[in-house]
Image: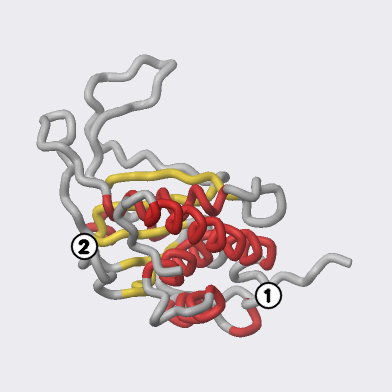
Amino acid sequence: MTEKPSRHYDRPLISRVYENLPGFGVDLFVGGREGASDVPLLRASGISTVLNCAVNLDFNYVAAPDEVSHDSRVGYGPAPIRYYKLGIVDGPGNPDTMFLAGYYQLLGALQQVLPEKPSYPMRERGNVLVNCRAGRSRSVILAALLLHLQIPKEFPTLASAVDHVREKRELRPDEWHETPKPMLIAAAESAAGWVRIVEADRARSGAVVKVSA
């Protein structure tokens, strides 16, 4: 039997789900395709970095390509938004390690420092948006995974972080069975365990660790 889809609710194009992330001093946002594609909105919200975690959605933020593209090429060059892409399926079909990769990609986007060279014109460190198509499932669970692992005293379980992001994203209880999808929550739980193993090994080897077990 096909599950009846949830009722559609209007909500902000982007939602601030955490203010002043400890250790980074920036805000974390979650949104869908409409918000992620609205560059004036992103800039007005202080967002300099976007992580798009939807495999079935792409953006081209390049406003002024380096050169005129041939018919067979898309435009390329610097953009007003620093853009990262992680291709997650909103349902079954993802390799187990996708959320492990997603966590470290999001953490890397927060930590990365670009060199002061002309070929890196966009060095601004601003707020970060995680987006998927609707901002209800993939982006919600990835943001929750980051909050759980980076701020474990405030979010001791993944479920507590998910509930927090749901509230900030204005997701209603009758949507929760699919926001996020259950298999994505399970994948994120597995990823959290793997991250603790990785970070424990890094701690033993003397690497800098930002995750509490």
Please, what secondary structure does the residue beneath circle 1 have?
loop
Q: Where does label 2 land, which residue?
A: 46
Q: Quick one: 78 or 108, which is closer to the camera? A: 108
Cα–Cα span, label 2 and label 1: 32 Å
Name the amino acid, label 2: Gly
Q: Is residue 90 left or right of residue 16?
A: right
Residue occupying the point 44% across, 50% down: 52
Q: Is residue 25 above or below residue 103?
A: below
State the residue lying farthest toward the right. Answer: 1
Residue occupying the point 28% across, 68% down: 27
Q: Quick one: 115 or 197, which is closer to the camera? A: 197
Crowd class of label 2 (few under 14; some 14 to 19; many from 20; radius 10 Å): some
N-terminal of the pair, mark 2 or mark 1, is 2
Residue 54 location (% of width, % of height): 53, 50
Residue 200 location (% of width, % of height): 45, 58
Q: How many marks?
A: 2
Q: Quadrant of the N terminus?
A: bottom right
Q: Is residue 202 above or below residue 6?
A: above
Please, what secondary structure does the residue beneath circle 2 have?
loop
Q: Is residue 61 left or right of residue 99?
A: left
Residue 43 location (% of width, % of height): 22, 58
Q: Where does label 1 land, which residue?
A: 177
Instruction: Give the image quarter of residue 194.
Output: bottom right
Q: Is residue 47 above or below residue 20?
A: above
Name the amino acid, label 1: His
Residue occupying the point 65% across, 70% down: 178
Q: Residues at badges 2 and 1 in contact (C-beta under 8 Å)?
A: no
Residue occupying the point 63% across, 55% down: 90
Q: Quick one: 16 or 10, which is closer to the camera? A: 16
Q: Is residue 152 visible?
A: yes
State the residue lying farthest toward the front. Answer: 204
Q: Is residue 33 visible?
A: no
